[in-house]
Image (tube, coloured by chain):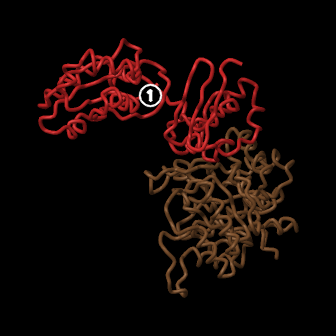
Amino acid sequence: MHATIQKPIKEIVKHIRPGEKVFVVGCNNCAWKCYSGGEAETEMMAQRLERRGIKVAGYTVPGPQGMSLCKLEHTRKVLMEDHAEEVKKADSFLILGCGQGVHTVIDATDGGMVHPGCDTVFGGETVSDTHIEEYCSLCGDCIIEYTGGLCPMTLCAKQLLNGPCGGAEDGHCEVDPNRPCGWILIYERLKKLNRLDLLDAYQPPKKNSKWSRPRTLEVSPTEATFCYIGGKVTVNNQD
Amino acid sequence: MKLSTLFNHDKFVITGEVGPIKGAIHRDKSIEPSCAIEALQLHQHVHAVNVTDNQSAVMRLGSLASSVRLKTNGVEPVYQLTCRDRNRLALQSDLLTAYSLGIDNVLLLTGDHIQLGDHKEAKPVFDLDSVQLIEMAQGLKRGYDISGNRIENYIDMSFGAVVNPNSDPLELQLMKMKKKIDAGAQFFQTQAVYDVRVFEKFINKVEKHNIPIQVGVVILKSPQMGKFMNKNISGIHVPDEWIEEIGSVDKEDRKKKAAEMTGTFIRKVKSMIQGVHIMPLGWTDIVPDILEHAEISKQD
């Protein structure tokens, strides 16, 4: 999921021009889980804007809970058909969702003016209803086969691939004593699995081209193609 | 002079360390930066002097410019190169530049994180880790860049690496040390150690590699410094006995005491190692005393 946090209301309001009519769009998947753009937060945002003298043309959260705003065709139908009248009156859209959601609204509204209502902070695991943790950096060049599924690109502050630096103290990272050293987590896990041998392999330098932006993924039931700057990878899902 | 040559001749290798200044070298060549002055003070007593690379992620004069200044002054530098601020292009280019400017020794490290320094909003690079950096440097020595392209005039430098005997779990640190050896590290300088037992335990585990190791020592200047290091410097532990001992004498006697304590520690561990790396943190003037207490001297 894409973890998001609402921007402070003062910052949101600052970018809305006098007289500008705003349509508020939430996301019923990731932003709902983050309490940053679910149904309740979207309705409340409309009220918070109105309280500050901003005209709100309407608001919606496309789809049922679990439906992502970034599902373009669905969002287009909701905005351009179900809310056609309100959308017509709107000068801009305030999106309570991640950066992908913001772009989905641009596409769905054929280039409408947008205001991001959230900062997209990371891709995370919803550990509990109130706690989200980052375990993947979306680098496109996964090495967690060698680390028991724990990602050093994410859990190590220096993104080291061949083991820890010398700075860990009592199992904690030198950068932030409140968080564990990612490499000690990897070590402890592999030790428990009796697979410390996995750590012996030299990990070559990262293929950073796979982390270049923007990237695309073409998918079908039989194969997928991941395209990045300077290359692409096609994988058959069936053989 | 490459340190690896000294090790090969069974010399007990003594190195010191200086940190480049926060600023540029004066255009007036008669004005030496403090790091060069400290290095000159060390010169008679050590084989080489490490020059740190934006140490603690604090922006300073470049390690390479400072290393070249030392070399010009007749002091053998160990050019420190970290992964924090450079991608693989810059790292290779800097290695080629260092060799071209006459540098013989380079210490290849990860580097402290940006968050520990004075430019906290800078982008941490870490394109390579220290193992990959050594592997890449070894490629340049063999005539290839990291992409496999041939290069002219291979670099012929001695590659050093670091290891922390204080690390817990030690096994994880040893795993990485082994990777560094396999990648091409020719000698090791350790993180500062104060406990003979900790160092002995480490040495017993790494003797099998048969690679030169210099024990790292940071001069403990005061009890406050010991407490500060224990609280703020990860990966170093100053035992209470050290803090009490340096605190047992008046301030004016601390240099003498520090020399005695540091020298005694080195004397206790010297039979296990092939050299010592002394980090004086400005107290370069007591290095001769330290060596005297350690009962060692620079062998040419």
User: Which structural element holds mark 1?
Assistant: strand
Q: Colour of chain A?
A: red
Q: Position of residue A149 (x, y in %)?
A: 64, 27
* Closer-to-camera residue (A66/B189): A66
Residue type, label 1: His
User: Which quadrant of the rendered structure holds the C terminus of chain B?
Assistant: bottom right
Q: Colour of chain B?
A: brown
Determine the residue positioned at 52% across, 69% down: B61
Is residue A147 found left or right of A128 in the rendered image? right
Up the image or down, B39 lies above or below B200; here it is: below
Up the image or down, B24 lies above or below B278; here it is: below
Determine the residue positioned at 37% across, 23% down: A31
In the image as oriented, which residue stretches furthest toward the top? A64
Q: Position of residue A216 (x, y in %)?
A: 52, 33
Q: Quadrant of residue B267?
A: bottom right
Residue A105 visible:
yes
User: Which quadrant of the rendered structure holds the N terminus of chain B?
Assistant: bottom right
Q: Position of residue B286 (x, y in %)?
A: 64, 72
Residue B237 visible:
no
Q: Residues within 10 Å of mark 1 (few under 14, many from 20)?
A: many
Determine the residue positioned at 72% across, 67% down: B105
Q: Position of residue B219 (x, y in %)?
A: 62, 62
Per the image, the residue denoted by label 1 is A2
